[in-house]
Image (tube, helix red, strand yellow):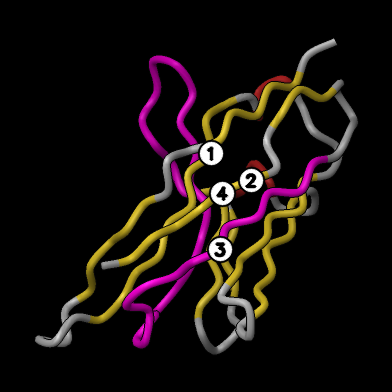
Amino acid sequence: QVQLVESGGGLVQPGGSLRLSCAASGNIFNIYAMGWFRQAPGRQRELVARILTDGNTAYADSVKGRFTISRDNAKNTVYLQMNSLKPEDTAVYFCNTRIYNDYNLLNDYWGQGTQVTVSS
Protein backbone atom coordinates (compact mmCIF):
# COMPACT_ATOMS: atom_id res chain seq x y z
CA GLN A 1 0.00 0.00 0.00
CA VAL A 2 0.87 3.67 -0.18
CA GLN A 3 0.93 6.16 2.65
CA LEU A 4 0.97 9.94 2.23
CA VAL A 5 1.66 12.12 5.24
CA GLU A 6 1.03 15.84 4.89
CA SER A 7 2.19 18.73 7.02
CA GLY A 8 2.45 22.50 6.93
CA GLY A 9 -1.11 23.79 6.92
CA GLY A 10 -2.38 26.50 9.22
CA LEU A 11 -3.73 30.00 9.55
CA VAL A 12 -2.07 32.84 7.66
CA GLN A 13 -2.95 36.43 6.86
CA PRO A 14 -3.69 37.52 3.29
CA GLY A 15 -0.44 38.08 1.44
CA GLY A 16 1.39 35.59 3.61
CA SER A 17 3.11 32.32 2.75
CA LEU A 18 2.92 28.68 3.73
CA ARG A 19 4.76 25.58 2.61
CA LEU A 20 3.04 22.21 2.51
CA SER A 21 4.97 18.95 2.56
CA CYS A 22 3.87 15.44 1.68
CA ALA A 23 6.01 12.38 2.30
CA ALA A 24 5.18 9.17 0.44
CA SER A 25 6.04 5.69 1.62
CA GLY A 26 5.13 2.09 0.88
CA ASN A 27 4.72 0.67 -2.63
CA ILE A 28 5.87 3.76 -4.55
CA PHE A 29 8.12 2.24 -7.17
CA ASN A 30 6.19 3.38 -10.25
CA ILE A 31 5.04 6.88 -9.48
CA TYR A 32 3.68 8.81 -12.45
CA ALA A 33 2.93 12.07 -10.68
CA MET A 34 2.56 13.74 -7.31
CA GLY A 35 0.44 16.76 -6.65
CA TRP A 36 -1.89 18.80 -4.53
CA PHE A 37 -5.65 19.19 -4.72
CA ARG A 38 -7.87 21.37 -2.57
CA GLN A 39 -11.48 21.40 -1.54
CA ALA A 40 -13.32 24.37 -0.11
CA PRO A 41 -16.68 23.99 1.67
CA GLY A 42 -19.47 23.41 -0.82
CA ARG A 43 -17.09 23.05 -3.74
CA GLN A 44 -15.61 20.18 -5.69
CA ARG A 45 -12.07 19.04 -5.16
CA GLU A 46 -9.80 20.72 -7.67
CA LEU A 47 -6.25 20.28 -8.88
CA VAL A 48 -3.86 22.92 -7.55
CA ALA A 49 -0.52 21.70 -8.90
CA ARG A 50 1.08 18.52 -10.17
CA ILE A 51 4.62 17.42 -10.90
CA LEU A 52 5.49 14.45 -13.07
CA THR A 53 8.48 12.17 -12.58
CA ASP A 54 10.18 13.90 -15.50
CA GLY A 55 9.88 17.21 -13.69
CA ASN A 56 7.11 18.73 -15.78
CA THR A 57 4.64 20.76 -13.76
CA ALA A 58 1.08 21.95 -14.15
CA TYR A 59 -0.84 24.55 -12.18
CA ALA A 60 -4.38 25.75 -11.81
CA ASP A 61 -4.78 29.16 -13.42
CA SER A 62 -5.81 30.63 -10.08
CA VAL A 63 -2.43 29.86 -8.47
CA LYS A 64 0.00 30.42 -11.35
CA GLY A 65 2.76 32.80 -10.36
CA ARG A 66 1.98 32.40 -6.64
CA PHE A 67 2.41 28.69 -5.92
CA THR A 68 5.38 26.49 -6.73
CA ILE A 69 5.43 22.70 -6.60
CA SER A 70 8.70 20.85 -6.17
CA ARG A 71 9.86 17.37 -5.41
CA ASP A 72 12.72 15.67 -3.57
CA ASN A 73 12.97 12.26 -5.19
CA ALA A 74 15.48 11.01 -2.63
CA LYS A 75 13.01 11.69 0.16
CA ASN A 76 9.87 10.80 -1.86
CA THR A 77 8.50 14.13 -0.76
CA VAL A 78 6.58 16.78 -2.64
CA TYR A 79 6.29 20.40 -1.54
CA LEU A 80 3.90 23.21 -2.31
CA GLN A 81 5.24 26.69 -1.66
CA MET A 82 2.30 29.07 -1.46
CA ASN A 83 2.99 32.81 -1.62
CA SER A 84 0.72 35.84 -1.82
CA LEU A 85 -2.08 33.84 -0.29
CA LYS A 86 -5.63 35.05 -0.73
CA PRO A 87 -8.79 34.30 1.29
CA GLU A 88 -10.06 32.29 -1.68
CA ASP A 89 -7.15 29.89 -1.20
CA THR A 90 -8.78 28.73 2.02
CA ALA A 91 -9.49 25.01 1.71
CA VAL A 92 -8.43 21.58 2.82
CA TYR A 93 -5.39 20.64 0.77
CA PHE A 94 -4.89 17.00 -0.17
CA CYS A 95 -1.71 15.37 -1.33
CA ASN A 96 -2.16 13.00 -4.26
CA THR A 97 0.04 10.50 -6.02
CA ARG A 98 -0.70 8.53 -9.17
CA ILE A 99 1.07 5.20 -9.42
CA TYR A 100 1.14 2.57 -12.16
CA ASN A 101 -0.15 -0.79 -10.97
CA ASP A 102 0.80 -4.25 -12.28
CA TYR A 103 -1.59 -3.78 -15.23
CA ASN A 104 0.00 -0.46 -16.21
CA LEU A 105 -3.07 1.41 -15.07
CA LEU A 106 -2.91 4.45 -12.81
CA ASN A 107 -4.16 4.31 -9.24
CA ASP A 108 -4.78 7.42 -7.14
CA TYR A 109 -3.74 7.66 -3.50
CA TRP A 110 -4.64 10.45 -1.13
CA GLY A 111 -3.36 12.00 2.04
CA GLN A 112 -5.61 12.83 4.96
CA GLY A 113 -5.75 16.54 4.11
CA THR A 114 -4.41 19.63 5.83
CA GLN A 115 -6.39 22.80 6.48
CA VAL A 116 -5.17 26.09 5.03
CA THR A 117 -7.00 29.18 6.22
CA VAL A 118 -6.23 32.63 4.86
CA SER A 119 -7.84 35.30 6.99
CA SER A 120 -7.06 38.55 8.73
Query: In 3D space, how far apart are the residues under numbered discs 4 and 3 (Cα atoms)?
Result: 7 Å
Image-based side of 74 in relation to 85, left or right: left
Three-letter amino acid code at disc 1? Tyr
Quick one: SS at disc 4? strand
Q: Earlier in the sequence, mark 3 or mark 1?
A: 3
The structure residue drawn at horizontal position 78% and vertical position 14%, both measured from the top left corner, is 119
Query: In 3D space, how far apart are the residues under numbered discs 4 and 2 (Cα atoms)?
Result: 4 Å
Three-letter amino acid code at disc 3? Ala
Three-letter amino acid code at disc 2? Ser
Indicate which label's residue lies in the foreground, 4 or 1: 4
**CB atoms of marks 4 and 1 within 8 Å:** yes
Q: Position of residue 31 (x, y in %)?
A: 39, 80
Q: Which residue is mark 1?
A: 93
Q: Residue furthest left?
A: 103
**CB atoms of marks 4 and 2 within 8 Å:** yes
- On whether residue 32 falls in the magenta region, the answer is yes
Q: Which quadrant does the C terminus fall into?
A: top right
The structure residue drawn at horizontal position 56% and vertical position 49%, both measured from the top left corner, is 6
Q: Which residue is mark 3?
A: 23
Q: Which residue is mark 2?
A: 7
Examine the image and state in which quarter residue 46 appears.
top left
Question: What numbered label is drawn on residue 6?
Answer: 4
